[in-house]
Amino acid sequence: MSAIITLSLLGILILYLGLYKAKNALLPVSILGLVAALGLEIYAWNQTAEPLYKGMVLFDHFALSFSIVCISLTILILFLSKEYFKAISDNIAEYYTLILFSLTGALMVCSYHNFAMLFIGLEIMSVALYILVGIRRKDKASNEASLKYFLMGAFSTGFLLFGIALLYGSTGSFDLAAIKQYILDNPTSVSPMFYAGILLLLVGLCFKVGVAPFHFWTPDVYDGAPILITSFMSTVVKIASFAGFLRLFSTVLVPLNEFWTPVLMTVVIITLFVGNISALMQTSFKRMMAYSSISQAGYMLFAILSIGPNSASGILTYSMAYGLASVIAFGALILVKRHVGSDQFESFNGLGKTNPGLAFAVTVGMLSLAGIPLTAGFIGKFMMFSNVMNDYHTVLLVLAAINAAIGVYYYLRVVVHMYFMKPSEEPVVSLPINFKVVFIVAVILTIILGVYPNAVIALI
Amino acid sequence: MTIFYFVAFLSIFFALMTIFTKNPVHSVLYLVITFFTFTVHYILLNAQFLAVVNFIVYMGAIMVLFLFVLMLLNLNKDTEPMKSNLVKFMGAIAGMCLLATFLGAFKVIETDNGMVQAHENIGLVKNLGKVLFSDFLLPFEISSILLLTAMVGAVLLAKKEPRVKHG
């Protein structure tokens, strides 16, 4: 809880700093505040976890570890923002504030124990993003993305709220523990409204994490948004939504899994194929990453599909791998786009010769996303696949393996462009110090996770 | 019970008028009356808070917003585009399917809900306030961040950007 309070106050402090024109203090103060919040989360690790504030929030190891991942990724992304926001407009303080508020919402989604908190957390997270997506006001694509995201987000919130209302109508409570008790008390006579509520909640959450068939907003929004915001959206927000998703299903809805497993299974299969095959067709790196985020979400759903004791650590590992790799990919895209001016695959041509360091980082990121051994992505995929294997979903496993192979093709396309294509005549891509630090940290973490995954798996 | 049937008739009648009238401004005004009949329903159900909120937010704020948009877009003529017959046909089928689903659902769900009958004063403002400031204090306080976010965003998106030339 203290981290959430710290971040809220930090956002307001940043607004004041912007008011008093302390432009240079914005980034350091934000990072310091985030580090403080991170410290508070780690400090809370050893305290006994019980629902606080009349059962509103619960900071167990699950919530804390996902919060820590979200905060750390935000720190990495903010490091990349040093020169980025200045190029857009002068209202930098507001941008930082909105990112911090969005992160606050994400922490609430990670740690909710009552639907009221889930709803408010999701709303804070999304409302800040609707605005951040549209901060390039002169850019048509950014405006379109913002409007689309807003409309789709509002719809999905409607579904979610309707689902929550139906669950309340049948159980009489918003509290996760009370709803769980309701299912345990009436295992055979669960109200039909409850089932309808589960379906609507599922639809709402699937919208938020962007899996097919509710993915139509994802490519356009990820493509139209400023790259830095895209990287925030596709990492922190997605991970937090997954944490919320998993918490709901693993604490409350497990006894009814015969009902929702077929639905979720269909969603997963559609997602894998739609995400991977569309990603295969793309010529723009940014759009490819958007579709790849859809297919990665499909893999993450594996853990919810076959919920067990390993689900939480599986999603945690997977989301760390995915988050780090995405930060690398989008960070590289910012640099490349700044110098070449386009986000097509061709702009990466010859990067292996002109800037070997950057090319190496991107290669590690891509290998991790594709799930090649010795990277974090492999461990993530391995845990997801073994989860599903334990439940004997063999068909799903075969389909997922086919999709993983498709994924390798399009992720390695970037690597081919970097190492085997002739560099263009453009000036050499330089590597600012803040990008260098972020890339080094992300690459090292990716490899450490890939070699010694127990450090994370043992956490939850 | 007779009041209920009368008000229910009025809400269905005005809802239909909202759809069938050609003039968009009239349509919005009929929608206002429809929302007003909903308010009456809420009062009949002893849900004071919902009634007040529905009255202020929906009938007041949102409907005025609708009218403003209509005014700004200058849609106050009979400018409704004619839909093709195919679209109308599809719309009718989809609507009927929805209706059939709802009827089936209502038949399955038992209509008397013990929860509501046990707390028949659940919708009063006093009870809501008590819950809001005791059990739901944290979400209530935290929604301030939501409002602040929306406020910052609105200012950010609406503010005029001076084109500053650097160097």
Image (tube, grey):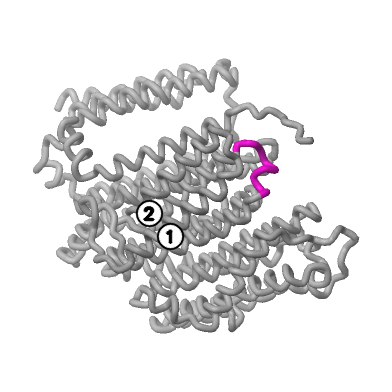
Which of the 4 quarters of the picture holds residue A329?
bottom right
Residue type, mark 2 in image: Ala
Mark positioned earlier in the residue sequence (2 or 1): 2
Our reading of the magenta stretch's main secondary structure is loop
Q: Is A122 or A204 nearer to us in this picture?
A: A122
Residue A45 shows up from this direction: yes
Total marks shown come to 2
Which x, y percent locates residue A153? 48, 46
Q: Where does label 2 land, which residue?
A: A3
Q: Is residue B105 left or right of residue A217?
A: left
- Give how far apart the Cα atoms at labels 2 and 1 are: 7 Å
Return the x and y of residue A101 as percentages of the image width and height. 46, 46
Q: Is there any visible trace of residue A403 in the rendered image?
A: no
Instruction: Please determine if labels 2 and 1 lie on a single subunit.
Output: yes
SS at badge 2: helix
Residue at the far left in the pictured view? B118
Q: Residue at x 29, y 23 (%)?
A: B37
Residue at left 77%, top 74%? A416
Residue A111, picture quadrant: bottom left
Horizontal and vertical percent for residue A215?
54, 56
Residue bearing mark 1 = A38
In the rendering, at what x and y percent does residue A274 appear? 59, 64
Query: Magenta part of the protein: which range?
Result: A83-91
The answer to if A341 sits in the magenta stretch is no
Q: Chain of mark 1?
A: A
Label 2 Cα crowd, 10 Å radius (few <14 / some 14-19 / many 20+) = many
Q: Does residue A147 sit above or below A69 in this rendering?
A: above
Q: Nearer the viewer, residue B129 or A166?
A: B129
- Left or right? Give the position of B44 relative to A451: left
Is A342 in front, or is A40?
A40
Of the numbered discs in the image, which one, if any, rests on residue A386?
A: none
